[in-house]
Image (cartoon, rainbow, N blue to C red):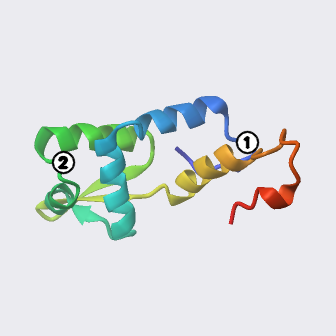
Amino acid sequence: MKHIDPTDISLEIAASTFAALGSEQRLSVLRCLVRAGESGLSIGELGQRSGVTGSTLTHHMKILAQAGLVTQKKQGRSIICAAVAFDAVRDLSNFLLKECCADSTLPDKDHDHG
């Protein structure tokens, strides 16, 4: 998913990106990569940290990559995986919270979101 203004994010884009995250294992893999930062992790290290290995990890990485959330690049003999869509994840959060409490009849002070 490309970084876009959260006011412009479409329901279709949000739904497809959330669908890519709709697996405990994929969410775990992405969280490990987010924790690792821009330098990423080798596929082996990612498997150890996430508990997802082999063809299952390959499958989940393919889905996350298609959603534009991660990249994989060959570095010597290793494959390095990295989360690249920090802004996209932030945009998804903003998409959910953009109209938070807009229809609420309670005063705004009761809806502090931090």
Q: Nearer the viewer, residue 16 or 109?
A: 109
Q: Nearer the viewer, residue 73 or 15?
A: 15
Tell me the quarter of the picture where residue 109 sits: bottom right
The disc labelled 2 sits on which kind of residue? Val
Callout 2: SS:
loop
Find the residue positioned furthest to the top: 12
The tag on residue 25 is none
The tag on residue 52 is 2
**Where is residue 55 drawn, in percent x and y?**
14, 38
Badge nearest the viewer, 1 or 2: 2
- Specify few, some or many for label 1: CA neighbours under 10 Å numbering under 14, 14-19, or 20 or more: few
CB within 8 Å, label 1 to label 2: no
Callout 1: SS:
loop
Quadrant that contains the C terminus: bottom right
Give the residue displayed 78% in from the left and 45% down from the top: 101
The tag on residue 8 is 1
The disc labelled 1 sits on which kind of residue? Asp
1 displayed left or right of 107: left
Tell me the quarter of the picture where residue 32 sits: bottom left
CA distance separating discs 1 and 2: 34 Å
**Where is residue 37 drawn, in percent x and y?**
38, 69
Q: In this view, does 46 lie above or below 2?
A: below
- N-term mark: 1 or 2: 1
94 displayed left or right of 83: right
